[in-house]
Amino acid sequence: MSEGREEKAEKSVMSELPGLAAFASMGTTIALCETVGVLLGLWADHSFGTGPTFLIIGVVLGTVMAVMSVVKQVRRYL
């Protein structure tokens, strides 16, 4: 009797894995886009001797890239 419950529980976990993978992918995408924007902004500020100007631009561009990428990923599932 308990074997049937275990199989049922295992099947429900397995059916949720694609959704979990999608959320993990979105989180990784957001983190990567923001990191790239910040690092490029810091590099540009250091190279040109400016204040946090390029850092702010990098954060904004990283956020825009992250939103665009997540929207693209979400549209696959709609």
Image (tube, rainbow, N blue to C red):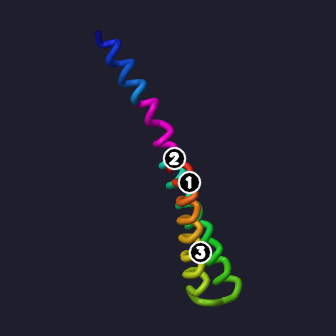
Q: Amino acid at mark 2?
A: Ala
Which residue is under mark 1? 73
Q: Residues within 10 Å of mark 1 (few under 14, many from 20)?
A: some
Give the farthest residue toward the top. 1
Label 3 near label 1: C-beta < 8 Å? no
Residue at point 41%, 31% (across, down) = 13
The percent coordinates of residue 29 (x first, y second) are 56, 57
Residue matched to label 2: 22
Pick whichever, 48 or 72, lies toward us: 72
* Image height of 42 relative to 13, above or below: below
34 displayed left or right of 4: right
Q: Looking at the image, is mark 2 or mark 1 earlier in the sequence?
A: 2
Inspect the magenta stretch and tell me whether residue 21 lies in it: yes
Residue 57 shown left or right of residue 27 in the figure: right
Q: Disc 1 or disc 3, which is closer to the eye?
A: 1
Badge 3 local density, few (<14 within 10 Å), some, or many (20+)?
Answer: some
Q: Earlier in the sequence, mark 1 or mark 3?
A: 3
Residues rendered magenta in the picture: 13-22
Residue 42 lies in quadrant: bottom right
| Secondary structure character of the magenta stretch overall | helix
**In the current view of this chain or complex, which residue is farthest to the bottom?**
50
Q: Which amino acid, mark 3?
A: Leu
- What amino acid is at disc 1? Gln
